Image (tube, grey):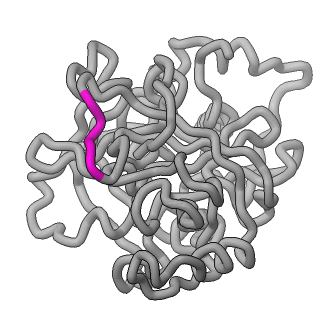
């Protein structure tokens, strides 16, 4: 049983996830604002960005398994957090070393199921207005067809061109597409592009536009597809694959985060998952009795709280 102070700390972290501290691979996207997507990370090899990812705790990043085909030398990898642009990340950005990478053992190669990986950082990061975790949904959360969500990344602007300097984080609003329609779209135009028909698996999620023109692209892989649910951003998917970038009848394909709840929980048992009903108990979380009339809103809004929470986590 967790000590009351630890249980309260975990509850505060859960309440704080998915809520940027600001007022409120992209093709056809637009520049993100400062502090708008504080969970977005850049995964770099030998100093160069090659995949995106999302911060889900002070020590763990969620990304795609195909980003880590070779993990024999983890010293080559770094994770950049708190950055809006890659050319000059700025004073709020932090580089973290990688301690280990856990790829889903069911992953079998490009366009296969289970294209998810978890990256453990060497040290817990300090939460700030620029570095905060996204909420991870439990299986009770359903992302309905037509729901407008957002995808972010530093990927290419097109199949031919990279993101121009200063390489500002891009954001794009995309609707969820149901699996039968997505399978139908991927069965079209196969002869025109000399492609084999692809099947959208049970753990996959499609989002985007049948007409193309707007999509994730090279360099966005592993990044988050997030949806606003009950005033918190929940990660619905991990950018996985697609045929080309923003082609007609080829929407983006994501790995459905809720499909891998059990695997994520085994790797990170302390992670607090977000249920569909935020008024209910946390999934497998601690029971915390707060003092009557205690208002947590001022605490959660304070920058100092994030610093204290991350510092405490680093010594637990």
Q: Is residue 256 covered in magenta?
A: no
| Quadrant housing the N terminus | bottom right
- Relative image position of residue 140 (x, y in whole percent): 80, 63
User: Residue 298: where, in percent of width, then height?
Assistant: 72, 12
Residue 273 x, y percent position in the rendering: 66, 54
Q: Quadrant of the C terminus?
A: top left
Q: Depth check: 79 or 143 in front?
A: 143
Q: Viewed as shown, does residue 309 lie left or right of 178?
A: left
- Please identify the residue farthest to the front as the structure is shown: 192
Looking at the picture, does residue 221 appear above or below residue 12? below
295 up-or-down from 47: above or below: above
- Magenta stretch, residue numbers: 160-164
Residue drawn at (65%, 15%), measured in percent from left and top? Answer: 301
Q: Is residue 268 above or below residue 217?
A: below
Numbered marks: total: 0
Instruction: Using residue 213 as the reference point, say whether residue 178 is left or right of it.
Output: right
Residue 7 visible to an observer of this rendering: no
Q: Is residue 238 above or below residue 160?
A: below
For the point 40% across and 31% down, which residue is it? 169
- Magenta part, dominant SS: loop
Q: Is residue 238 left or right of residue 145?
A: left
Residue 161 falls within the magenta-colored stretch: yes
Residue shown at 30%/36% (left/top)? 163
x%, y% of residue 228? 73, 39
Rendered residue at 33%/53% (across/down):
159
On the question of residue 156 being in view, the answer is yes
Quadrant of the image occupied by residue 150? top right
């Amino acid at each position: 049983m967790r000590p009351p102070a630890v249980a309260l700390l975990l509850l505060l972290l859960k309440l704080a996830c998915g809520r940027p501290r600001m007022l409120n691979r992209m093709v056809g996207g637009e520049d993100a604002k400062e502090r708008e997507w504080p969970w977005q990370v850049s995964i770099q090899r030998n100093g160069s960005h090659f995949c995106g990812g999302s911060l889900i705790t002070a020590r763990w990043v969620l990304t795609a398994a195909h980003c880590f085909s070779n993990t024999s030398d983890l010293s080559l990898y770094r994770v950049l957090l708190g950055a809006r642009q890659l050319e000059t990340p700025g004073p709020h950005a932090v580089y973290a070393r990688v301690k280990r990478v856990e790829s889903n053992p069911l992953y079998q190669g490009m366009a296969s199921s289970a294209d998810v990986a978890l990256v453990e950082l060497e040290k817990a990061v300090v939460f700030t207005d620029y570095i905060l975790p996204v909420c991870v949904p439990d299986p009770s959360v359903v992302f309905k067809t037509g729901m407008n969500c957002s995808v972010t990344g530093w990927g290419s602007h097109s199949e031919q061109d990279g993101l121009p300097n200063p390489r500002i984080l891009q954001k794009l609003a995309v609707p969820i597409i149901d699996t039968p329609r997505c399978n139908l779209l991927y069965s079209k135009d196969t002869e025109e592009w000399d492609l084999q028909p692809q099947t959208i698996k049970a753990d996959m999620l499609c989002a985007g536009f049948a007409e193309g023109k707007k999509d994730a692209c090279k360099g966005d892989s592993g990044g988050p597809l997030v949806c606003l649910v009950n005033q918190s951003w929940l990660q619905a998917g991990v950018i996985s694959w697609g045929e080309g970038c923003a082609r007609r009848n080829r929407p983006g394909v994501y790995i459905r985060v809720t499909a891998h709840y059990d695997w994520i929980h085994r790797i990170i048992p302390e992670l607090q998952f977000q249920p569909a009903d935020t008024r209910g108990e946390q999934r497998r979380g601690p029971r915390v009795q707060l003092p009557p009339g205690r208002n947590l809103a001022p605490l959660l809004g304070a920058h100092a709280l994030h610093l204290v929470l991350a510092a405490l986590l680093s010594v637990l």
